[in-house]
Structures are given as C-alpha cells and as structure tokens.
Image (tube, grey):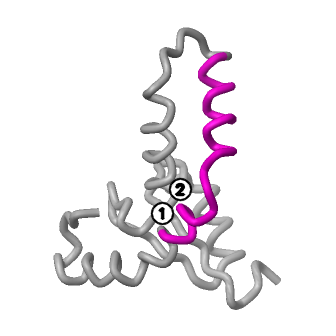
Amino acid sequence: MGILLHYKLYLDNDPKNNAHIYRLWALYHCLQVIGTPAQSPDFNPIENIWNHLNNRIRKFKISSKNELREKLISEWDKIEGNVCANLVKSMPKRLNEVIKCKGGPTHY
C-alpha cells in the first residue's frame, strides 16, 4: 500500500516534480496529488519562511559560504514558533484570496 489514505502529496511546481520517474512514483503511491500553479507562494507557507530568513540574514555582511551557512543556521534557530503557526493559520484567508483573484496574483 502507498502512503496512507488520508495523506495528500503536495507538489509546489518544482521542475523536479515533473520528472517521469517522480510522476510514476506519485501515481503508484499517492491517492491524491495536489498541484499548484507556478510561482504560487500563496499556497506554500515555507516560501514565506524562506523570505523571513532571507530578510534576517541580509542585515549581516557575509563574506564566505561558511559564514552564510553559520548565519542561516543561527537565524533559522531564532525563528519563533508563532511565525510558523501564524502562517499556517493564515491559509484559509490565503486560499479565499486566491479564489477571489481567480488564481491570479494576490497580496501575499
């Protein structure tokens, strides 16, 4: 049996998700696959977390890959749980906004 019946595979339109082997795996292992339009952070709170992290590390003068890695890890650890919780809680409003905009751009 594939992934449990109540799970849904969420595809965020990453080009890797279009690979033939990936699509075959999803076909045989996932009963429900949810795809999203290109460039749709409205549906994907992690995109907002990446943006939040990006804004946090831009305040530093980073001069090497190692320093970037260290700052990313350090700043990631400082992200408070309520930031993630608020993004998840905002999903109904985000989805209603996407419906209202008929799949077009939203303010998110």
Q: Name the residue under label 1.
A: 45
* Residue 71 as seen in the image, left or right of residue 38: right
Which label's residue is closer to the chain start, 1 or 2?
Answer: 2
State the residue in front, 106 or 89: 89
Magenta-colored stretch includes residue 82: yes
Q: Is residue 87 above or below residue 38?
A: below
Image x and y of residue 33, in percent:
54, 77
Secondary element under disc 1, as helix, strand or loop, is helix
Q: Name the residue under label 2.
A: 17
Type of amino acid at the residue the image marks with label 2: Asn
| CB atoms of marks 1 and 2 within 8 Å | no
Give the residue drawn at x 44%, y 27%. 59
Type of amino acid at the residue the image marks with label 1: Pro
Magenta-colored stretch includes residue 75: yes
Q: In this view, does 94 lie above or below 76?
A: below
Q: Which of marks 1 and 2 is in front?
A: 1
Give the residue drawn at x 57%, y 56%. 20
Q: Is residue 46 above or below residue 67?
A: below
* Placement of the C terminus among the 4 image quadrants: bottom left
Q: How crowded is mark 2: few (under 14 residues within 10 Å), some or many (20 or more)?
A: some
Give the residue drawn at x 48%, y 37%. 56
Secondary element under disc 2, as helix, strand or loop, is helix
Image x and y of residue 4, in percent:
76, 85
Image x and y of residue 23, in percent:
58, 63
Q: Residue furthest top?
A: 63
**Which residues lie in the magenta part?**
67-86
